[in-house]
Image (tube, grey):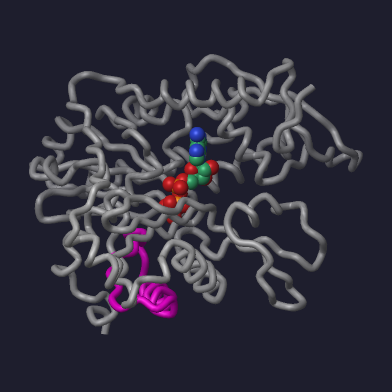
Amino acid sequence: MLTLFGWTSKKKVSRAEVLQKRAERRKKSTQPIATTTPKIQSRKERTTISPFERLALWWAYDIGIDLGTTNVLIYIKGKGVVLDEPAYVAWNINTHEVVAVGEDARIMLGRTPADIEVIRPLQDGVINNYDMTEFMLRYYIKSVLPASSLFKPRIVICVPSGITPVEKRAVIEAVLQTGARKTVLIEEPLAAALGTGLDKATSAGAIVVDVGGGTTDVAVLCTTGVVVSKSLRMGGDKFDEAIIAYIKRRRKLLIGRRTAEEVKIAIGTVDRKAPIEEITVRGRDIVSGLPKAITVTSKEVQKALERPVSIILEGIKDILEKTPPELVAEICDHGIILTGGGALISGFDRLITRAIGVAAYLVDNPRYSVIVGTGRALREMDRFQDSLEELQ
Ligand SMILES: Nc1ncnc2c1ncn2[C@@H]1O[C@H](COP(=O)(O)OP(=O)(O)OP(=O)(O)O)[C@@H](O)[C@H]1O
């Protein structure tokens, strides 16, 4: 019996087979589900740079950051995406020393001695632990910036569309502490739209649904920018919590967050009609207190996810109700553009299409839409006003 990240598979399958199956599921889920709407082409980012740009890079760097609840991605102008790491920090609660950052910290989750705590400095898309956010940002920026850079970088950073001015200020201050010379905040749905190649298409109006780890941003965009938007404190994390709660309530088994995420990625679906898959999950029996393994089906995961997913559907309906009627008609032609890692769960596009009555499309590489869009925004850096000045 194979053990993989806390869960065991019933059949004898190798890790390579599991990964191949997962890749096939992802590939399948990125297939368009209708032919009425043109598929958005994600254009390949330019990776070659001119000698002048190379010289400019030696003097100063322009950096784009997707400061996500679950992942941090960094883009350097002229280089592309240079960092993709989980947003975790492990620290010693007695000495206050940071012992690991990123993937090294994530793998320690639930397996640390009493004095080590693994935290995510951002929760629900906003800064939860200011000092750790600043540390993590400084650490990541330092790890991607060459020592040859003479000047402090200019940074474009993505934030959820619904964050308050106080939360915005906290993000800007954390970025300034890292040594940034200019900081510009842009809203995640706008960056996601740019990242999916919607900059040309927005003249016709489009709706983008970005399902992240902590937040889901729903926004209607057109040439003038974001027309109407909403940020829901709902995303992949809440899906994991719903799986934990369901298995605890119905199967009397306590499982950890990492196991819940593995279950979600391996067999998770939101489609009632999806073929049934199974996985063996290990945890602690809440009656006996002893370790136990049970088989969980994709049907159970679908049931567990009904409530969190319905909140996202309600959010989309709410935004469509607030959208000017002319744009609604154009959105129907364009379809609903789905981005973000949380949208990778099987059947999300089909469910939205059925529930809303407008075709939904999962873009290629949904986890990278925001950071690729941030990279595009970097080209316009001179046009943007410093967000701190704007707030003051
Ligand atoms: N194949 C998959 N199936 C289902 N969920 C997935 C898959 N891959 C990643 N996820 C989920 O996607 C989420 C992370 O997505 P993403 O990286 O877009 O979030 P983020 O940008 O860090 O969050 P936010 O936008 O809320 O700040 C996690 O909850 C993760 O479990």
What residue is shown at x 77% (from left), y 57% (from top)? 112
Residue 220 belongs to the span the image colors magenta: no
In the rendered image, which quarter is residue 390 located in? bottom left
User: Is residue 235 at least partly visible in the picture?
Assistant: no
Residue 175 belongs to the span the image colors magenta: yes
User: Is residue 267 at least partly visible in the picture?
Assistant: yes
Residue 44 in the image: state x and y as whole percent.
Answer: 25, 39
Residue 272 in the image: state x and y as whole percent.
Answer: 49, 21
Residue sitting nearer the eye, 123 or 53? 53
Q: Is residue 116 left or right of residue 141?
A: right
Residue 95 in the image: state x and y as whole percent.
Answer: 74, 78
Q: Is residue 283 left or right of residue 198?
A: right
Residue sitting nearer the eye, 48 or 81? 48
Note whether 372 is above or below 296 in the view shown: below
Residue 205 in the image: state x and y as whole percent.
Answer: 13, 43
What residue is shown at x 36% (from left), y 72% (from top)? 168
Q: Is residue 81 left or right of residue 244?
A: left
Q: Is residue 235 left or right of residue 166?
A: right
Q: Quadrant of the C terminus?
A: bottom left
Q: Which residues are magenta?
A: 156-185
- Residue, far front: 51
Note whether 43 is above or below 349 in the view shown: below
Note whether 175 is above or below 240 in the view shown: below
Residue sitting nearer the eye, 382 or 248? 382
